Image (spheres, coloured by chain):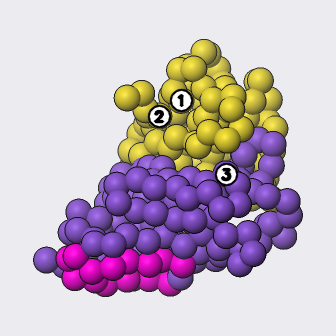
Chain colours: A yellow, B purple
Amino acid sequence: EPEVTQTPSHQVTQMGQEVILRCVPISNHLYFYWYRQILGQKVEFLVSFYNNEISEKSEIFDDQFSVERPDGSNFTLKIRSTKLEDSAMYFCASKNSNSNQPQHFGDGTRLSIL
Amino acid sequence: GNSVTQMEGPVTLSEEAFLTINCTYTATGYPSLFWYVQYPGEGLQLLLKATKADDKGSNKGFEATYRKETTSFHLEKGSVQVSDSAVYFCGMSHSGYSTLTFGKGTMLLVSP
């Protein structure tokens, strides 16, 4: 069964550094998402992406964050200047065009900011 | 605003016990409702879904019924197994792009 893959599984970065989290969505999917889960808290929506542009974003997704689909397969989340509070699990998800279909999630990237 | 509330964990049960994890939602309109499961070290996997009132989602012995009158989507299983130990997330989608809003998650621990 096709799946969403995320790399790396664990990223350790110094505060203030830039970090890029990578995702390869399922190949025929058209909608892409990033979520994050701070340890012990709920999974929170960050941003959705469709047709090469952001379609929706939460208040968490400020100017420090950006997303990109640089080629036909990758979907990346960039954090420009990381803060301690950015430490979390970051999940990528994708879905096909049917709005009642579920999102498929990757295994996540654990981001640790030192 | 839109939100999902689910019962606090951990829920600790013996094998073959009956499971209920409560979930209620607040939303405008009629969202689709989901249960996702997260096994240790893994991502979120869809467990079941319901897209309209009175629908029942079911999978792997788990069930949940979309109750519009009580705005609930409680997860149930008649006989849990040790392998069901995981964190369970109730979620809903409420926009044309189906952005998911999740509850805080409920950890289930099943002992032999």
Element assignment for label 1:
loop
| Precedes in sequence: disc 1 or disc 2 | 2
Q: Residue at x 69, y 28 (%)?
A: A97
Q: Which residue is mark 3?
A: B51
Residue B5 image position (x, y, % from top left): 64, 76
Q: Residue at x 21, y 69 (%)?
A: B82
Element assignment for label 3:
loop
Say what amino acid the circle numbered 2 marks.
Val
Q: Is residue A7 above or below residue A51?
A: below
Residue A86 image position (x, y, % from top left): 60, 60
Q: Using the rendered view, name the quadrant where residue A59 is placed.
A: bottom right
Mark in the foreground, 2 or 3: 3
Residues under numbered marks 1 and 2 in contact, where contact means CB atoms less than 8 Å apart: yes
Specify the subunit that label 3 lies on. B
Residue B43 image position (x, y, % from top left): 42, 50
Say what amino acid the circle numbered 3 marks.
Thr
On screen, residue B74 versus residue B62, left or right, reads right
Q: Which residue is mark 1?
A: A25
Element assignment for label 2:
loop
On screen, residue B11 versus residue B14, left or right, reads right
Mark 2 is surrounded, within 10 Å at the Cα level, by few (under 14), some (14 to 19) or many (20 or more) other residues, namely many
- Of all residues, the one furthest to the left in this rendering is B112
Q: What range of the chain is rendered magenta?
A: B8-22
* Front-most of residues B28 and B40: B28
Q: Which residue is mark 2?
A: A4
Specify the subunit that label 2 lies on. A
Mark 1–mark 2 Cα distance, whole angstroms, equals 5 Å
Say what amino acid the circle numbered 1 marks.
Pro
Name the quarter where the N terminus of chain A is drawn.
top left
Determine which of the numbered discs, if any, sits on residue B74 in the image. Answer: none
